[in-house]
Every structure is written in C-alpha cells, then in structure tokens.
Image (tube, rainbow, N blue to C red):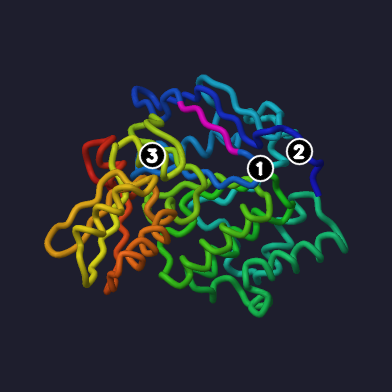
Amino acid sequence: MLDTVTTADVLSASHLGKRFGDRVAVDDVSFEVAPGETYGLLGPNGAGKTTTIRLVCGLLRADQGEIRVAGRPLGTTATSAKKYIGYVPQDIALYPDLTARENLSFFGRLYGLRGRALRHRVGKVLDLIGLSERSGDRVESFSGGMKRRLNIGAGLLHEPTLLVLDEPTVGVDPQSRHAVMESVRSFGAAGMAVLYTTHYMEEAERLCDRVGIIDHGRLIAEGTRRELVAQLGERDRITLAATGDLEVLADRLRRLDGVDRADVKDGQVQVLAGEARRLLPDVLDTAERSGLSVRSVEVDEPDLEAVFLHLTGTALRE
C-alpha cells in the first residue's frame, strides 16, 4: 500500500500545453481532483482528452505547465509521483493467451508486488471487478466488457491514490457498460480520486462530481452539473396534472421559497424552480392542502447536453 496522501488535491494540473507540430492539442488547461472525487473530462473525440490524460500520467512531456500528484511534481521521469497513479488506457492492454489471474499477476509484479501480497491483491481485484469465477480462463475467450473490466483491474493492483480512466466503456455492450460504471462509482465512494474521460453525456452526469468540458484543446467550463446548468440561466420545471382549482394551486405555489414561477398552461400547472427535486415534496404537500388530486408529476432538469450546445454552438460530436 502507498503512503498516506495528506495534500488537499490528489491531482493538480496547472496551465498545461502541448503541441504536435502546428497543431495545438492541449491549450492552457488547468484543473484539480480531490480525494474521493470523480472528475470527468467531457468532450468529443479529438478534443484533447487523451493527450491531457497522457500528460497527467507522465507518458508525454508537457510543453508548458505543471502537474503535481499527491503533492509531488510529475514529469516523464518522475517515478515518485507516478507510483500513486493507476492508469487504464483506452486500448485494451492485456495478454490474450494468458488467463485473467496470470495477467493480473504479471502486472502486479511490474508494480513490485510479490508472494503473498501479490496473491492477496490479485484475488481482491478479481472480486472487485466481478471476474473471480473466470480467473482461470484465457482473456481471448472474454467478451469486450470483461476485457474492459480486467483492464481496469490491472490499474488497481497497487492501490493507487489516483485512478485515471480513458474512455473505459468504448465498444462494450450496455450490460458491461453498466458494470464498469458501477465499479467506477464504488472507487470514488471508497475515497479514491478518479479522473474519467468520456464523450458520453449520461456517463458524465451519472458518475462525476465535477465535470470539465474540453473542446479543441481548451477547458471551456467546469463545475458540478448544477453549476454548469446555472450558466445557461435555465431552471428546472415541474409539471403537475391535477383535478381541482389549478389557479388556486398556482397562486399558492408562487409563495413557496425557491419557486420562480407557477402558471396554468394547457390544463396543467407548470412550476419553474432552481432545485425541483428538493422542492417537489413541498409542491405535492401544497397541492394536497389545496384540495387537488394529483394525477401525474413530471420533473424536467436541464442537462449537460444543453450546456455543451450552449458553450460550443454544436451538439457533442462522436
């Protein structure tokens, strides 16, 4: 196990820049990831996510900027910082003619694990990624989703402080994708810092505590989903279909703290608010006290796709 990390941020990236000839791949990118936080880099293919990841892991040398992992400066030769990182690349990095256990044992030895400690970590990781029952099978017989999970397992063997996942669900079936996402959710809950790149909106919304939107090599916005949506000036919407005096209900709802507007439209009451789900119990209680019978309730929240469209002028490109 690695030394305890006392720094406030597990990862700190400041003003990173990287060129390939005349092309600017990463342009003045800065962000931090705290212990127990899952930070998502959201952007289309070619936006600069993978280059940023490779800089953060010390696989590429930055043309400018500074990276610190667990408080230690990181570069292409900085082994003291790299030992805190578990890197899971976008491409499968496994030996197909070896079994799952043999693959993990091999990578564990690269991390310096030996003997009983190695066997313990391999067994624990196999349990964690749900492949214990297939541990003796060759990887060539695995589905794409199983290979993805084993790929993640290889990055967990040395109990990293920072787990870096580059598009870990690309090319897998929905069931395997769900399994991968549930695993990632558990890592953050256990206190691990996770840096997660994706071009899938729903993954960023479901997994990430904060999201950085990257496009054309620049980090154009970051924050929680709620903070990013607030940049649009849009509000959540609650729509109630009910039997009774809708105008009376709308008038009473306008007096609730947190309600911006309440109007009757098309035989329904529509409520605009900053945090609809928090407000919903009060809305339903007001409807009941007003003598109305609620038939249905719908909550509509602005999502990251609306934010991305607003910031870039285009939908998320594949």
Dot 1 crowding, Cα within 10 Å, few <14, some 14–19, many 20+: many
Residue 57, given in percent of the width and then of the height, sits at: 59, 38
As helix, strand or loop, the secondary structure at mark 3 comes to: helix
In the image as oriented, which residue stretches furthest toward the left?
A: 266
Give whichever of discs 1 and 3 has the lower sequence position.
1
Residue under circle 1? 35
Give the amino acid at mark 1: Pro
The front one of 201 and 79 is 201
Of labels 1 and 3, the one closer to you: 3
Q: Residues within 10 Å of mark 3 (few under 14, many from 20)?
A: many
SS state under label 1: loop
Identify the residue under disc 3. 228
The structure residue drawn at horizontal position 47% and vertical position 46%, both measured from the top left corner, is 197
Amino acid tagged 3: Leu
Identify residue type, mark 2. Val
Q: Which residues are magenta?
A: 29-33
- Side (left or right) of 135 relative to 283: right
Mark 2 lies on a secondary structure that is: loop
Assess whether residue 206 is covered by the magenta stretch: no
User: For the image shown, how many numbered marks are present on the structure?
Assistant: 3
